[in-house]
Image: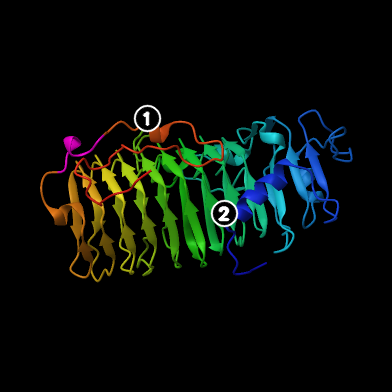
């Protein structure tokens, strides 16, 4: 199903309350409870829970709530979601009262696809989703052939998820997918042995199109390829208040290593579609390649108040022929090169425009511990008021 509405912050908060609390009797919604000691022949109540998340997904109807008790759910087949909710009655899936729920895909055959092999489309993802109007929150997805793989998904809210140590990208959205919100995601340590590191990103919105997709409050780190990848996605994506670091290093000793190592890859393809992605108030540091790269995207991207630091490549790489990006008030600090800006790109008020020397002594702190620490109780990023903030008070770069 398709629509144009984007969930507001208030709606997201309501979604979390819906997942963690009982469904409203007035709405006619059903709450389905899942527990590791349940039975799929049970009615799915708190006293008699279901055993598998898949059974709850199969039973759920628009407006229903699936609440999962804490524990490790070891999959032998991936969780497949193909039935949609509605705009007025989305389906909710999340943990019971904040308990820790781990969905483990280690036993899935596709998690161990051999080098050079391909993963059948239906087997992609510990959660494989082709549905709309869902609210999925608070789950930890590990060791899957992708953590979440969503193709042809619209009007969903994904919040407070952790996708790590998967055998492909932690979270991938693709196909005809519009108006999805990915909020407060932690995605790290994802790798792809079958491609020697070529394609496992923290978060990929790629190979598709659809307006209204938003990424906010994500942390994408130590993934084998890129932190964020928008390869061949033909519609604008809004990325804000997000951090990418430590991506692109061969921590797994893969032979013929192919990881790219960009913090934010803002497009790509042959030819790359011209797309006006928005990147604002983000940080990208200590990546194996560029902090931010257009990757051949000649579109009118807007890069505003972002910070790159100590990347092995260029801080802001926006030099594609015919590029029309606008770079405003960005900070490059101790990157191999601050910026590569093409003739069609507009750059103003950035650190390299202001001149002077930008190094560790130019900022209040280079200690990432505050920003990489535990999230706030509401899932938002921790405060880091000094990290990579100019001592001079210059209005450049991100603030957290």
In this orientation, does residue 314 appear? no
Where residue 357 sits in the image (x, y, percent)? 11, 44
The residue located at (74%, 41%) in the rendering is: 67
Assess whether residue 249 is covered by the magenta stretch.
no
- Extent of the magenta region: 358-364
**Numbered mark located on residue 369 in the image:** 1
The residue located at (20%, 62%) in the rendering is: 348
| Marks 1,2: beta carbons within 8 A | no
Name the quadrant of the N terminus. Answer: bottom right
In the image: residue 385, left or right of residue 320? right
The residue closer to the viewer here, 203 or 348, is 348
How crowded pointer 1 is (Cα within 10 Å; few <14, some 14-19, many 20+) is rated as: few
The answer to whether residue 121 is above or below residue 234 is above
In the image: residue 234, left or right of residue 351? right
- Which mark is first along the chain, 2 or 1? 2
Name the residue that disc number 2 marks. 9
């Amino acid at each position: 199903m398709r629509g144009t509405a984007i969930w507001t912050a208030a709606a997201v908060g309501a979604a979390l309350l819906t997942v963690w609390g009982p469904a409203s009797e007035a709405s006619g919604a059903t709450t389905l409870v899942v527990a590791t000691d349940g039975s799929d022949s049970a009615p799915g109540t708190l006293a008699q829970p279901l055993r598998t998340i898949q059974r709850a997904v199969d039973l759920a109807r628009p407006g229903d709530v699936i609440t999962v008790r804490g524990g490790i759910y070891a999959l032998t087949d991936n969780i497949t979601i193909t039935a949609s909710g509605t705009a007025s009655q989305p389906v909710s899936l999340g943990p019971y009262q904040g308990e820790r729920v781990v969905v483990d895909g280690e036993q899935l055959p596709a998690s161990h696809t051999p080098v050079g092999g391909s993963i059948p489309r239906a087997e992609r993802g510990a959660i494989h989703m082709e549905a709309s109007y869902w609210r999925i929150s608070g789950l930890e997805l590990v060791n899957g052939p992708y953590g979440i793989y969503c193709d042809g998904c619209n009007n969903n809210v994904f919040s407070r998820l952790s996708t790590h140590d998967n055998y492909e990208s932690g979270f991938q959205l693709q196909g005809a997918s519009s108006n999805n919100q990915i909020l407060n995601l932690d995605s790290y340590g994802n790798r792809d042995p079958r491609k020697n590191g070529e394609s496992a990103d923290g978060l990929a919105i790629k190979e598709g199109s659809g307006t209204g997709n938003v990424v906010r409050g994500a942390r994408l780190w130590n993934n084998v390829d890129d932190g964020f990848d928008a390869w061949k996605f033909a519609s604008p994506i809004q990325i804000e208040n997000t951090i990418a670091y430590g991506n692109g290093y061969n921590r797994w000793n893969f032979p013929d290593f192919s990881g790219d190592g960009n913090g934010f890859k803002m497009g790509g393809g042959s030819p790359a579609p011209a797309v006006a992605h928005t990147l604002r108030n983000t940080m990208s540091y200590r990546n194996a390649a560029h902090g931010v790269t257009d990757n051949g995207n000649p579109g009118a991207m807007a890069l505003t108040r972002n910070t790159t630091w100590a990347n092995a490549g260029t801080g802001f790489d926006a030099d594609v022929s015919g590029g029309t990006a606008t770079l405003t008030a960005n900070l490059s600090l101790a990157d191999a090169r601050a910026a590569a800006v093409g003739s069609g790109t507009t750059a103003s008020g950035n650190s390299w425009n202001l001149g002077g020397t930008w190094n560790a002594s130019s900022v209040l702190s280079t200690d990432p511990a505050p920003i990489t620490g535990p999230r706030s109780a509401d899932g938002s990023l921790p405060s880091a008021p000094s990290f990579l903030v100019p001592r001079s008070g210059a209005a450049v770069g991100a603030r957290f």
